[in-house]
Image (spheres, grey):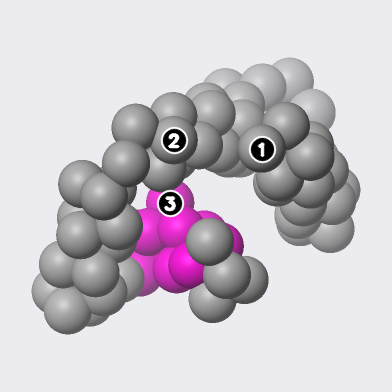
Amino acid sequence: MIIVDYILLVKHFKGGTSAEEESSLQDWLSKSEINRKRYEKLKISWNSENNPSKEVLKSHNKAWSNLFKKIVEDDKDE
């Protein structure tokens, strides 16, 4: 997975993808179980970092930093 895919995932999690981008994302998800697992892990991480019901919202930079750490960890596991 290249970095552009991570940018697309963040756009997707923020609800800002076009129909063409969503199609690309679905294609990527259908290619392997690893992609689907990575997506689910990142989605959970994204949602926990950006949950407005939390008492204290983390800064945008902190959310990006944590998401990037998860990405790096996932890449090390493969």
Q: Considering depth in this image, is 16 or 35 the residue closer to the camera?
A: 35
Residue lying at 38% horizontally and 59% vertically, measured from the top left: 12
- Amino acid of disc 1: Glu
Query: Picture coordinates of residue 41 (x, y %)?
Result: 53, 29
Left or right: residue 9 compared with residue 49 = left
Badge 1 density bin: few <14, some 14–19, many ≥20, Cα 10 Å: few
Regarding residue 61, the answer to whether it shows in the image is yes
What span is in magenta?
Answer: 5-16
In contact (CB < 8 Å): disc 2 and disc 1: yes
* Of callouts 3 and 2, the N-terminal one: 3
Give SS at disc 3.
helix
Q: Which residue is mark 1?
A: 78
Please tell me whether residue 14 belongs to the stretch shown in magenta.
yes
- Kindly indicate the quadrant of the structure image that contains residue 22: bottom left
Q: Considering depth in this image, is 60 or 6 the residue closer to the camera?
A: 6
* Of callouts 3 and 1, the N-terminal one: 3
Give SS at disc 2.
helix
Left or right: residue 20 compared with residue 36 = left
Residue 56, relative to residue 62: is it above or below? above
Query: Picture coordinates of residue 78 (x, y %)?
Result: 66, 37
Give SS at disc 1.
loop
Badge 3 density bin: few <14, some 14–19, many ≥20, Cα 10 Å: some
- Amino acid of disc 3: Phe
The disc at residue 34 is 2
Q: Given this view, does label 3 or label 2 mark the residue nearer the observer?
A: 2
Estimate the spatial distance between the alpha carbons at disc 3 and disc 2, rounded to whole Å.
Answer: 18 Å
Residue at the extreme front: 78
Residue lying at 57% horizontally and 70% vertically, measured from the top left: 2
Left or right: residue 37 compared with residue 17 = right
Q: Which residue is mark 3?
A: 13
* Of callouts 2 and 1, the N-terminal one: 2
